[in-house]
Each structure stands twice: as C-alpha cells, then as structure tokens.
Image (cartoon, rainbow, N blue to C red):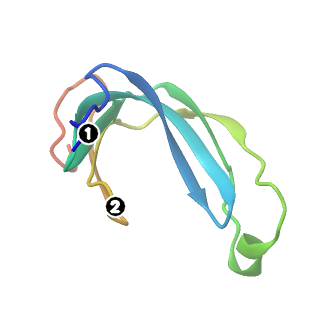
Amino acid sequence: MKPFAGWRPGKAVVLRGTGYGRLWFALPCRVVQDLPERIALYWRAGTPWKGVRQHPIGREVLTPRKAELDELVWNETDVLLLARPGEAHTTWACGKPGGGNFAAGT
C-alpha cells in the first residue's frame, strides 16, 4: 500500500463547488491539515473569489448553460472548513475577521 501523501500545511489550494456538471464557485484557501480521514482548510475575510451572484432555482439548475462566475470578496468572517473525504457535507467554523476564534457565532 502506498503511503498517504497529502498537502502540507500552508499550501495554497482552490476550493471548488460543483454540481449538475457546472462550476459554481472557486475560492482560494490554505491547507491547515490534510490527513486520510480529514482535511482542514482556512480562508480570511477579504479573500477574493469567484462565484455565482444569484443561484438558479427550479429548472434553471438543470439548464445546460454555463454558470457565469462573478468576481466577489468573502467579507464577513474568517473560515475554518473541516471535511471528511467521501462525505457529502462539510463543517464550517466562522470567526470574527482576524480574531482566530472559530467558535460558531463568534
């Protein structure tokens, strides 16, 4: 068996949101931890990213056209994202910008 070779802490990566064959957002972040059972990513308030400004609803989601990505800025919080490979969800801990406190709601 090949040993696990994950990303090193501090590595710049892009978190991409996809669905229905489309790219919905691309957000640059830093690797905090990358283990076989968990990955932790971090980005700060003020991070520029690309995403859809208005999400499609109903049948619009299934329309075979390219989603238009706008230049956006993540303004509200610093974020620590926790994910388990293969899971259909992630956990986002949000904290005050520059505060380093990731307790939910602070």
* Residue where numbered disc 2 is placed: 86
Corner quadrant of residue 43: top left
Given residues 33 and 81, the one toward you in this image is: 33
Q: In this view, does 61 lie above or below 18?
A: below
Q: Where is residue 80 shown, x and y percent of the image? A: 27, 39
- Crowdedness near tag 2: few (<14), some (14–19) or many (≥20) residues, C-alpha within 10 Å: few
Given residues 75 and 18, the one toward you in this image is: 18
Pick whichever of labels 2 and 1 is earlier in the sequence: 1
Given residues 97 and 40, the one toward you in this image is: 40
View extreme (front): residue = 1
Type of the residue with mark 1: Ala
Residue at horizontal 84%, vertical 61%?
65
Q: Is residue 94 above or below residue 42?
A: below
Position of 70 with respect to 51 (left or right) is: right
- Crowdedness near tag 1: few (<14), some (14–19) or many (≥20) residues, C-alpha within 10 Å: some
Type of the residue with mark 2: Gly
Position of 55 with respect to 5 (left or right) is: right
Residue at horizontal 68%, vertical 62%?
21
View extreme (bottom): residue = 58
Position of 46 with respect to 6 (left or right) is: right
Question: Which mark is drawn over residue 40?
Answer: 1
Residue at horizontal 27%, vertical 31%?
5
Q: Where is residue 39 shown, x and y percent of the image? A: 26, 42
Mark pair 2, 1: CA separation? 14 Å
Q: Where is residue 28 shown, x and y percent of the image? A: 49, 30
> Depth-wise, is mark 2 or mark 1 nearer the camera?
2
Q: Quadrant of the N terminus?
A: top left
State if disc 1 and disc 2 touch (CB < 8 Å): no
Position of 7 with respect to 57 (left or right) is: left
Residue at horizontal 26%, vertical 39%?
40
